[in-house]
Image (tube, rainbow, N blue to C red):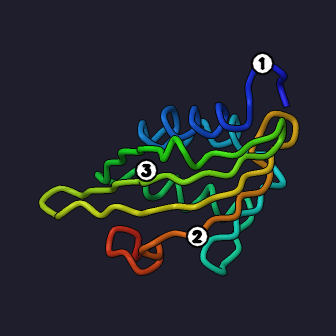
Protein backbone atom coordinates (compact mmCIF):
# COMPACT_ATOMS: atom_id res chain seq x y z
CA UNK A 1 0.00 0.00 0.00
CA UNK A 2 1.22 3.47 -0.72
CA UNK A 3 2.12 4.85 2.70
CA UNK A 4 0.50 8.20 1.90
CA UNK A 5 -2.91 6.69 1.09
CA UNK A 6 -4.78 4.63 3.66
CA UNK A 7 -7.07 1.74 2.75
CA UNK A 8 -10.03 3.93 3.74
CA UNK A 9 -8.84 6.78 1.52
CA UNK A 10 -8.36 4.38 -1.39
CA UNK A 11 -11.88 3.00 -0.99
CA UNK A 12 -13.50 6.42 -0.67
CA UNK A 13 -11.53 7.75 -3.64
CA UNK A 14 -12.65 4.72 -5.68
CA UNK A 15 -16.29 5.48 -4.85
CA UNK A 16 -15.99 9.18 -5.77
CA UNK A 17 -13.79 8.83 -8.86
CA UNK A 18 -14.94 5.53 -10.34
CA UNK A 19 -18.44 4.69 -9.07
CA UNK A 20 -20.12 8.10 -8.87
CA UNK A 21 -18.48 9.24 -12.11
CA UNK A 22 -19.12 5.82 -13.72
CA UNK A 23 -15.56 5.66 -15.02
CA UNK A 24 -14.89 2.01 -15.86
CA UNK A 25 -11.44 2.95 -17.22
CA UNK A 26 -10.36 3.30 -13.56
CA UNK A 27 -11.09 -0.34 -12.69
CA UNK A 28 -7.42 -1.40 -13.11
CA UNK A 29 -6.30 1.65 -11.14
CA UNK A 30 -8.32 0.67 -8.06
CA UNK A 31 -8.62 -3.12 -8.33
CA UNK A 32 -5.82 -5.68 -8.22
CA UNK A 33 -5.78 -8.13 -11.19
CA UNK A 34 -6.33 -10.99 -8.71
CA UNK A 35 -9.33 -9.21 -7.15
CA UNK A 36 -12.15 -11.33 -5.72
CA UNK A 37 -15.51 -10.01 -4.54
CA UNK A 38 -17.73 -11.93 -2.15
CA UNK A 39 -21.14 -10.29 -2.00
CA UNK A 40 -24.21 -11.76 -0.33
CA UNK A 41 -22.85 -15.30 -0.68
CA UNK A 42 -21.78 -14.98 -4.32
CA UNK A 43 -18.24 -14.69 -5.64
CA UNK A 44 -16.87 -12.78 -8.62
CA UNK A 45 -13.35 -12.61 -9.99
CA UNK A 46 -11.87 -9.44 -11.46
CA UNK A 47 -12.99 -10.12 -15.04
CA UNK A 48 -16.61 -10.85 -14.09
CA UNK A 49 -16.70 -7.84 -11.73
CA UNK A 50 -15.14 -5.51 -14.32
CA UNK A 51 -17.41 -6.68 -17.16
CA UNK A 52 -20.52 -6.09 -15.03
CA UNK A 53 -19.37 -2.61 -14.06
CA UNK A 54 -18.54 -1.69 -17.66
CA UNK A 55 -22.07 -2.72 -18.73
CA UNK A 56 -23.93 -0.91 -15.95
CA UNK A 57 -21.75 2.24 -16.18
CA UNK A 58 -22.74 2.47 -19.87
CA UNK A 59 -26.40 2.83 -18.85
CA UNK A 60 -28.23 5.89 -17.56
CA UNK A 61 -28.11 4.77 -13.90
CA UNK A 62 -26.71 7.36 -11.46
CA UNK A 63 -24.93 6.80 -8.15
CA UNK A 64 -24.59 8.69 -4.89
CA UNK A 65 -22.51 7.43 -1.96
CA UNK A 66 -22.62 8.42 1.68
CA UNK A 67 -20.62 7.04 4.58
CA UNK A 68 -21.28 6.08 8.17
CA UNK A 69 -18.27 7.95 9.57
CA UNK A 70 -18.59 6.22 12.96
CA UNK A 71 -18.37 2.72 11.47
CA UNK A 72 -14.87 2.70 9.93
CA UNK A 73 -12.09 0.49 11.28
CA UNK A 74 -8.78 0.22 9.50
CA UNK A 75 -5.18 -0.83 9.60
CA UNK A 76 -2.62 -0.11 6.87
CA UNK A 77 -3.91 -2.75 4.44
CA UNK A 78 -7.52 -3.43 5.47
CA UNK A 79 -10.61 -1.39 6.10
CA UNK A 80 -14.11 -2.20 7.28
CA UNK A 81 -16.97 0.22 6.94
CA UNK A 82 -20.56 0.96 6.17
CA UNK A 83 -21.82 2.94 3.21
CA UNK A 84 -25.09 3.66 1.49
CA UNK A 85 -25.13 3.63 -2.28
CA UNK A 86 -28.14 5.24 -3.89
CA UNK A 87 -28.87 4.30 -7.48
CA UNK A 88 -31.45 5.74 -9.78
CA UNK A 89 -32.56 5.32 -13.36
CA UNK A 90 -34.58 8.01 -15.17
CA UNK A 91 -38.28 7.94 -14.38
CA UNK A 92 -37.82 5.44 -11.54
CA UNK A 93 -37.70 5.82 -7.79
CA UNK A 94 -34.20 5.71 -6.33
CA UNK A 95 -33.00 2.59 -4.51
CA UNK A 96 -30.60 2.89 -1.61
CA UNK A 97 -28.33 -0.03 -0.74
CA UNK A 98 -26.79 -0.35 2.70
CA UNK A 99 -23.37 -1.97 2.32
CA UNK A 100 -21.27 -3.37 5.15
CA UNK A 101 -17.84 -4.21 3.80
CA UNK A 102 -14.32 -5.37 4.52
CA UNK A 103 -11.61 -4.61 1.96
CA UNK A 104 -8.06 -5.94 1.85
CA UNK A 105 -5.47 -4.10 -0.22
CA UNK A 106 -2.31 -5.35 -1.93
CA UNK A 107 0.12 -3.15 -3.85
CA UNK A 108 -2.10 -0.10 -3.31
CA UNK A 109 -5.16 -1.73 -4.90
CA UNK A 110 -8.29 -3.44 -3.64
CA UNK A 111 -7.46 -7.16 -3.61
CA UNK A 112 -10.38 -8.71 -1.73
CA UNK A 113 -13.78 -7.29 -0.91
CA UNK A 114 -16.32 -8.97 1.33
CA UNK A 115 -19.70 -7.28 1.53
CA UNK A 116 -23.26 -7.71 2.61
CA UNK A 117 -25.84 -5.49 0.97
CA UNK A 118 -29.42 -4.77 1.76
CA UNK A 119 -31.36 -5.01 -0.36
CA UNK A 120 -29.40 -7.64 -2.26
CA UNK A 121 -27.92 -6.22 -5.49
CA UNK A 122 -29.20 -9.23 -7.42
CA UNK A 123 -32.78 -8.57 -6.32
CA UNK A 124 -32.81 -4.96 -7.54
CA UNK A 125 -34.49 -4.07 -10.82
CA UNK A 126 -31.62 -1.70 -11.66
CA UNK A 127 -29.17 -4.60 -11.86
CA UNK A 128 -31.44 -7.40 -13.07
CA UNK A 129 -29.62 -7.85 -16.38
CA UNK A 130 -26.05 -7.53 -15.07
Q: What percent of the width, then of the height, locates residue 55? A: 47, 58
Query: Secondary structure under badge 3?
Result: helix
* Position of residue 127 measured from the top left corner of the image (x, y, whole percent): 40, 70
Q: Residues within 10 Å of mark 2 (few under 14, many from 20)?
A: some
Looking at the image, tell me whether mark 2 or mark 3 is earlier in sequence order: 3
Q: Secondary structure at mark 1?
A: loop
Q: Eyeballing the image, is 123 above or below 31? A: below
Q: CA distance from mark 2 to mark 3?
A: 21 Å
Relative to residue 36, is residue 49 drawn left or right?
Answer: left
Q: Is residue 53 left or right of residue 108?
A: left
Label 3: which residue? 57
Q: Secondary structure at mark 2?
A: strand
Q: Report x, y in % for residue 58.
A: 40, 50
Q: Is residue 71 above or below residue 121?
A: above
Say whether marks 1 and 3 touch (CB < 8 Å).
no
Residue lying furthest front: 70
Residue 94: give x, y in percent of width and height. 24, 60
Residue to which mark 2 is pinned: 116
Label 1, label 3: how far apart the Cα atoms are: 29 Å
Whether pointer 2 and pointer 1 mark residues with C-beta atoms closer than 8 Å, the reply is no
The residue at 80%/50% (across/down) is 104
User: Which mark, by number, is residue 4?
Assistant: 1
Query: Between tags 1 and 3, which lies in front?
Result: 1
In the depicted view, which residue is nearer to us: 51 or 35? 35
Q: 106 or 7: nearer the eye?
A: 7
Q: Is residue 7 left or right of residue 107?
A: left
Amino acid sequence: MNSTVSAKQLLQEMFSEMVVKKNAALLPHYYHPDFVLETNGRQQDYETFAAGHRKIYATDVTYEVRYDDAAWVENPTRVAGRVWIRTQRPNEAPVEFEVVLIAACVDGKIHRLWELTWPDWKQAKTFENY
